[in-house]
Image: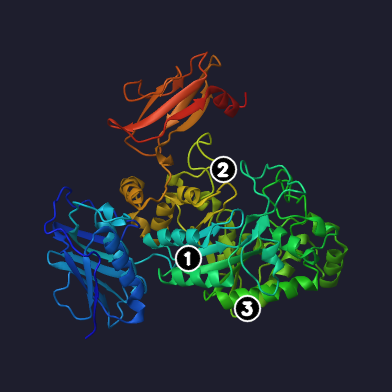
Amino acid sequence: MKKLSLLVCSCLMGTFVFAQQANTSIAIIPEPVQITTHTGQFVLPAVLTVQAGSHEGMTPVLNLIKNKFSTATGKIIRVNAAAPTAALKLVLNKTTDNVIGKEGYYLSAKAKGITIRANTEAGLYYGVQTLLQLLPKEIEGKVVAKNIKWAVPIVDITDYPRFEWRGLMFDVSRHFFTKKEVMSYIDNMAKYKLNLFHWHLTDDEGWRIEIKSYPKLTTVGAYNVKREGSFGDFIPPKPNEPRTYGGYYTQDDIREVIKYAQQRFVNIMPEVDVPGHSLAAVVAYPELSATAGADKYVVRSGEKIMDWSKPGHPALVDNTLNPAGEFTYTFLDKVVGEIADLFPFGYIHMGGDECAKNFWEQSDQVKALMAKENLKTQEEVQSYFEKRLEKIVESKGKKFMGWDEILEGGIGPNAALMSWRGVKGGIEAAKLGHEVVMSPTTFVYLDYMQSDRIMEPHVYASLRLSKTYEFDPVPEGVDAKMIKGGQANLWTEQVYNIRQAEYMTWPRGFALAESVWSPASKKNFNTFFTKVEKHFARFNEAETKYAPSAYDPDFKPGRNADSTLNVTLTNEVPGLDIYYSFDNSYPDNFYPKYTGVLNIPIDATQLKVITYRGKQPVGRMISMPIDELKRRLGK
């Protein structure tokens, strides 16, 4: 018998001062399949014995327990393969339980201890994550918490995921995030049982992965001129400005992050975005372009690159790879080969979105390709490119995936599709027999504004928490077997640092987690938001940023019959009161309470509002310029 002992602190207080009772209000995100509550609590002993196997596969589960408890509780943790009286038992089923599948678990908290049972180590890991959510919020802290009663409610939980693909995409190309920051992002995913990290590694603003066959991809393509402000409207960099902003991951960095994710039962899917969004690659190797003068291009900092007001969004510089050049395919063969060797996950995402074709239309090489291959449209040209690329990916032992534009001109025979422009592309691909991951802008684009645009970094669209919570990866009329799952995407044009990345992801990431894990029949926004607020408190303990935007009201301006201005305020969260002022002072709950449409005084310049629950402010103070309301009416 092998016995492991971990001394977390040299001494413990002889007695606990129970200044805080354990929180018996259960708030688990994502919502489990079944919860049965009972009377009472189990109080963790000063020495926490964990019964578990000592084989390598258990290491991530035991590390999670040791790290959390050693940091927050100051308890002694002992792991023993055979401990009948252990406070926490982790049991792997000897015979597979088909109800809970690969990632499910049973958690039973009784008066004498806790048992988590699963078919796999992944199931045990998720069971432990649920256990942590049953403990007081201080379990998420970074120091030993004093005067806390470490107890869990007596409860029985049956749980398993609705979908196997539960993803978050993180764009590290528009702005670079360090290896440690990426790891912290993965940590928060794993807390909420998200298991697919889609790593967007290349774009016009930077190539972030070392490719030894083409070193200039990172020595040149990974850096640009630093700009801050409103991305997309930056002034073009001057020739003498230093191009030192950015960075990349070495292949050793990549291996380290992959291992880190595996220890949290998270797969990583890399994305190399081609043939569009490829300016960083073209700058490094101009021979990838079909356009003369590409050797004068520079890696984009955020200056205007496309004209989105015109059909086909023509590019102002050619940020595409040459579909008619054999060097393009030689290049991609080596790039994909090195990436396939690095990433164990079975899929590689190769982009395919927003490929401007105006430069292809002018290229003699592309015209010759169209004549040779009998291609009638530029969409068919891209399809030719995608199908050749699919063969390259498959030759490396991987499955090819792309955004829904790969449908245009004809999808390749074995391609998997990620549907982002709503669900239409996903429906079409599924009916054609292709695997689909749903990731529609309508519900899960985390770069969109979460509140009124005067409160958020400006993006062209908004996405409220309640709308994200409506996400269902399986549209009506589609064979659910073709839908692998769902995913949210965080593009980082307006996200300059990891704190803002956290702000944009949470709590909408909670809504995503519940949409891809929990039974659809158990979803209820009002119940969900009650849980969200408890997880806000947990994030405070963990020092993780989140958005309080759900407390902010919506503003809808209108005009009365006499042409005077009015405004309607609506709350996303039920049970809140809105207080307001027009006199430029800052309202509190002694000010007028909103009860219906407000007529705006003729000389008012500002409407200030704040939301309360009872006597406590919960929302941010918002100052809405009256001129902004007028602009929204178009006058």
Name the kind of residue labelled 1 in the image: Leu
Viewed as shown, does residue 144 lie left or right of 327? left
Q: Which mark is residue 461?
A: 2
Which residue does the image show at 18% across and 63% down from the upper left? 11
Residue 53 place in picture, x, y as percent:
27, 80
Query: Is 305 or 465 nearer to us in this picture?
Result: 305
Q: How many marks?
A: 3
Name the kind of residue labelled 2 in the image: Ala
Q: Which of the 4 quarters of the picture holds residue 616?
A: top left
Residue 459 place in picture, x, y as percent:
58, 43
Which residue does the image show at 44% across and 66% down from the upper left? 195
Viewed as shown, does residue 306 lie left or right of 20? right
Q: Are marks 3 and 2 in contact (CB under 8 Å)?
A: no
Measure how far apart labels 3 and 2 are at the Cα level. 37 Å
Residue 154 place in picture, x, y as percent:
17, 60
Name the kind of residue labelled 3 in the image: Glu
Query: Is 355 or 416 nearer to us in this picture?
Result: 355
Query: Is 375 or 102 nearer to us in this picture?
Result: 102
460 lies above or below 602:
below
Q: According to the image, label 3 marks what residue?
A: 394
Q: Earlier in the sequence, mark 3 or mark 1?
A: 1
Q: Earlier in the sequence, mark 3 or mark 2?
A: 3
20 lies above or below 385:
above
Q: Nearer the viewer, mark 1 or mark 2?
A: 1
389 lies above or below 144:
below
Q: Which of the 4 quarters of the picture holds residue 47?
A: bottom left
Quadrant location of the C terminus? top right
Q: According to the image, label 1 marks what residue?
A: 196
Viewed as shown, does residue 269 lie left or right of 83? right
